Amino acid sequence: MADVQVKLSALWVCLMLTYLLGDVVRIFAGDFKPGEISGQAMSQPMLLGIAVLMLIPIIMVFLTLVLPNPVNRWANIVLAIGLLLFNLVGLPGYPGAYDKFLIVVSLGFNVLTVWYAWRWV
């Protein structure tokens, strides 16, 4: 059976790919306007915030494999819960059924991350 660190790292990869899939489908569906989010022009600070937010799963893929256990466990729990809450707040703002579906899938990955990290001894 795979080590918990490998499972957690794989869950972060799955989460990031789900986020990217949503972005790609949104582009093909035409459900976006370049340079805007929810009708608001994107600023440099907004783009930086998005970049930082999207880097969390990418960085966690690596950190999950190298951090010592107590720090690793809590980093996975705290960051997965943080992203879960962020996505729950944003869920009503997505118009497409595919968006809602992919957000629910990502919430499932967050729940699994918390569950595996919580049970990790």
Image: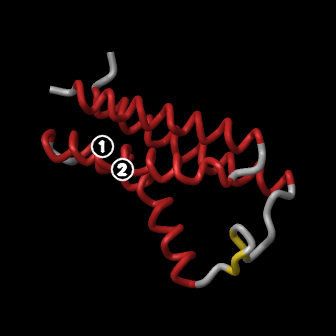
Say whether residue 42 is left or right of residue 69: right
Give the labeled residue for mark 2: 60
Mark pair 1, 2: CA separation: 8 Å
Furthest residue toward top: 1
> Residue 77, how many percent across, how many down?
29, 41
Say if 87 sits above or below 11 in the image: below
Q: Secondary structure at mark 2?
A: helix
> Residue 6, how many percent across, how many down?
34, 32
- The crowd level at tag 2 (other Cα within 10 Å; few <14, some 14-19, many 20+) is many
Say if 106 sits above or below 79 in the image: above
Say whether residue 103 is left or right of residue 27: left
Say if 18 sits above or below 121 in the image: below
- The crowd level at tag 1 (other Cα within 10 Å; few <14, some 14-19, many 20+) is many
The amino acid type found where label 2 is placed reads Met
Q: Tell me whether the residue at label 1 lies in contact with that at label 2, contact meaning CB atoms closer than 8 angstroms.
A: yes
Q: Secondary structure at mark 1?
A: helix
Query: Mark 1 or mark 2, which has the lower sequence index?
Result: 2
Looking at the rendered image, the quarter that the C terminus falls into is top left
Q: Which mark is residue 68?
A: none
Looking at the rendered image, the quarter that the N terminus falls into is top left
**Rendered residue at 38%/39% (across/down):** 9
Q: Which mark is residue 76?
A: 1
Residue 116's quadrant in the figure?
A: top left
**Rendered residue at 85%/51% (across/down):** 29
**Rendered residue at 51%/37% (across/down):** 107
Say if 31 sits above or below 6 in the image: below
> Residue 44, how many percent across, how many down?
56, 84
The amino acid type found where label 1 is placed reads Asn
